[in-house]
């Protein structure tokens, strides 16, 4: 399956540096990207970054979305607004949202459903924390989160799953290819259970301290269909090295 490498810029980047990063990546993409590439800037920069990457083949995504299309929700961004700015994807259920904004699986399901309704592909994030891993509960936790966060109507065409162990995010403690193989094989089985054959076509991304040095071995794992990259996505050389570790088909 063709890989998807997605950059999650999180709450980073003022205008000048965001535009510089976007135009650097767009220049590289115009000479051809090995796999699909997505950038998810902060919502303040979506419009400007969208203009810079337009025509380069790089896709644009939001880092979160509200479950409703519009209304009295101060500070929130709706999936319809993201689509209106040219986004094709929205990340939902990132562990930082789950932890900092108390988002439950039920909320994540609503957000994913709203993203679908707006025509966006939902990148649903899940992953166990350090204590859950030590207790040997990683598979149990991701299984619960997966089935608890998939909305009705989810399919390979509108849904990407990102396995992001919380202990690996922003820590430099990347999961080993063995850890990733075990969880991704398990998630693949669960996706087939949920969707039948279509479960084979759902992209499964790995995220958590992916960098230029470890991307090729992580992206070579059988059921890893791409990466969700935080810190390294802010450095064009590093991010592009990850893109180049992806598979064309
Ligand atoms: P990281 O973040 O690559 O900085 O670990 C990944 C993510 O949170 O999506």
Image (cartoon, rainbow, N blue to C red):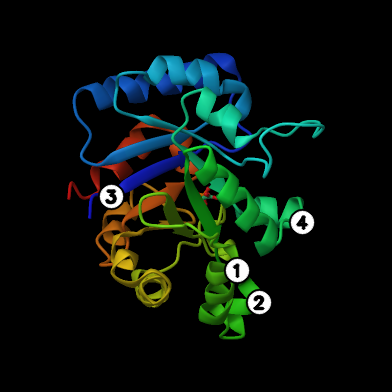
Whole-percent x and y of residue 32? Answer: 19, 29
Q: Residue at x 44, y 23 (%)?
A: 21
* For residue 200, side relative to residue 103 (left or right): left
Q: Which mark is residue 102?
A: 4
Sequence-first tag of 1 and 2 = 2
Is the N terminus in the top left, top right, bottom left or bottom right quadrant? bottom left
**Label 4 – label 1 distance at C-alpha:** 15 Å
Sequence-first tag of 3 and 1 = 3
Residue lying farthest to the bottom in this orientation: 136
- Whether the residue under disc 4 has CB within 8 Å of ligand 1: no
Q: Quadrant of residue 15?
A: top right
Q: Regarding mark 4 in the picture, which secondary structure is present there? A: loop
**Label 3 – label 2 distance at C-alpha:** 30 Å
User: Are discs 1 and 2 less than 8 Å apart at CB?
Assistant: no
- Whether the residue under disc 3 has CB within 8 Å of ligand 1: no
Depicted 49 relative to depicted 73: above or below: above
Looking at this view, is 176 or 110 the one in front?
Answer: 110
Looking at this view, is 179 or 201 the one in front?
Answer: 201
Disc 4 vs disc 1: which is toward the camera? Answer: 1
Label 2 crowd (10 A; few <14 / some 14-19 / many >=20): few
Sequence-first tag of 3 and 2 = 3
**Label 1 – label 2 distance at C-alpha:** 20 Å
Q: Which mark is residue 148?
A: 1
Q: Which residue is mark 3?
A: 3
């Amino acid at each position: 399956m063709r890989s998807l490498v997605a950059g999650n810029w999180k709450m980073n980047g003022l205008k000048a540096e965001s535009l510089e990063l976007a135009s650097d990546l767009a220049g590289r993409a115009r000479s051809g990207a090995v796999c699909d590439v997505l950038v998810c800037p902060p919502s303040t920069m979506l419009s400007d970054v969208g203009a810079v990457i337009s025509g380069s083949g790089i896709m644009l995504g939001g880092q979160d979305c509200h479950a409703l299309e519009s209304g009295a929700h101060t500070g929130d961004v709706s999936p319809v607004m993201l689509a209106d700015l040219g986004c094709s994807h929205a990340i939902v259920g990132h562990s930082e949202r789950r932890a900092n904004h108390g988002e439950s699986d039920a909320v994540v399901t609503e957000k994913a459903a709203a993203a679908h309704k707006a025509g966006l592909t939902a990148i649903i994030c899940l992953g166990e924390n350090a204590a859950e891993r030590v207790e040997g509960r990683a598979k149990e936790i991701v299984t619960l989160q997966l089935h608890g966060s998939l909305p009705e109507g989810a399919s390979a065409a509108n849904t990407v799953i990102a396995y992001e162990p919380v202990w690996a995010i922003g820590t430099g403690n990347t999961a080993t290819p063995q850890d990733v193989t075990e969880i991704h094989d398990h998630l693949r089985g669960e996706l087939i259970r949920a969707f039948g054959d279509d479960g084979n076509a759902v992209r499964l991304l790995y995220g958590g301290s992916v960098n230029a040095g470890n991307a090729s071995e992580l992206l070579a794992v059988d059921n890893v269909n791409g990466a969700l990259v935080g810190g390294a996505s802010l450095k064009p050389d590093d991010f592009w090295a990850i893109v180049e570790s992806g598979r064309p088909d």
